[in-house]
Image (cartoon, rainbow, N blue to C red):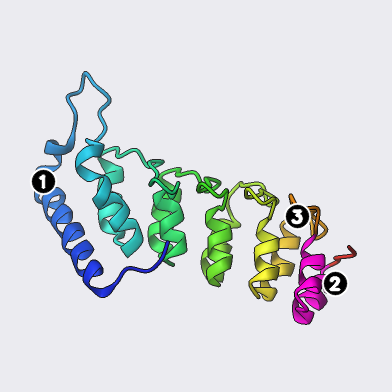
Amino acid sequence: MRGFSTARRVVRNAAVAAIAALLSASCAEHVYRPAMYSGTVDTRAYTDDWFAAAREGRTDIVQLLIDVHYPIETATSQGYTALILSAYDNHPDTLRALLDAHANACAADKHGNTALMGALFKGETNIAQILLGTRCPIDQTNNAGETALSFAALFGRLDMLSVLVAHGANVNHVDARGGTALQMAISQHNTAAADALRQVGATQ
């Protein structure tokens, strides 16, 4: 989920502007399948626009596609859903629109990383706070057995440790390699993280 180059952003912005013009000009009937079928939009025509809108925070376009029943759990080849992308790129309004449409906040990419993990990796604590209001398991793990608390500790989001623990995070969680966040912090000589973990109850 690397950032777009300036040129690519221009192209993406043009794409999302075009889809907005189409849908807002009362042309939404063109994206419906006949009623005898699923009633959803043709994913072949609008998938690129869907993901571009999520990445760029174009809540208007995301909402228009939601309104015409675009399948909101569609994922990229890397496993990124629109919700993951909007969270990772720090677009809270788009994220809320997707949550209001019942998008799965617990969805994970092909590495098992969730939107909450991505937000903590990027340091977007405002996004993390929104996601903590969902019903996802607080100790949901990625493919390496790491939790959101592991991400907060290892990427320096130490102010979020107490918040995660207050939501029930296990500060002594053991990952797939058999280690804890505290053990990892100590092995990396990350004194600040180790101290912060101990302050919220880490003992191993």
Q: Is residue 203 left or right of residue 105?
A: right
Magenta residue check for 32: no
* Label disc, if present, on residue 168 of the rendered structure: 3
Q: Amino acid at mark 2?
A: Arg
Residue farthest to the bottom? Answer: 192
Circle 3 crowding by C-alpha within 10 Å: few under 14, some 14–19, many from 20? few
Circle 1 crowding by C-alpha within 10 Å: few under 14, some 14–19, many from 20? few
Q: Amino acid at mark 1?
A: Ser
Magenta residue check for 183: yes
Q: Secondary structure at mark 1?
A: helix
**Mark 3–mark 1 CB contact (< 8 Å):** no
Above-or-below relation of 104 to 197: above
Q: Is residue 23 left or right of residue 117?
A: left
Across and down, in percent, residue 174 comes to 80, 53
CA–CA distance in space, label 3 to label 1: 47 Å
Residue farthest to the top? Answer: 36
Q: Which residues are magenta?
A: 180-200
Q: Which residue is mark 2?
A: 198
Picture quarter with the N terminus? bottom left
Q: Secondary structure at mark 3?
A: loop
Across and down, in percent, residue 90 comes to 44, 67
* Label disc, if present, on residue 26 of the rendered structure: 1
Residue at 84 percent of width and 74 percent of height: 199
Kindly indicate the quadrant of the structure image that contains residue 52: bottom left
Depth check: 151 or 190 in front?
A: 190
Across and down, in percent, residue 203 comes to 90, 65
Q: Main secondary structure of the magenta part?
A: helix
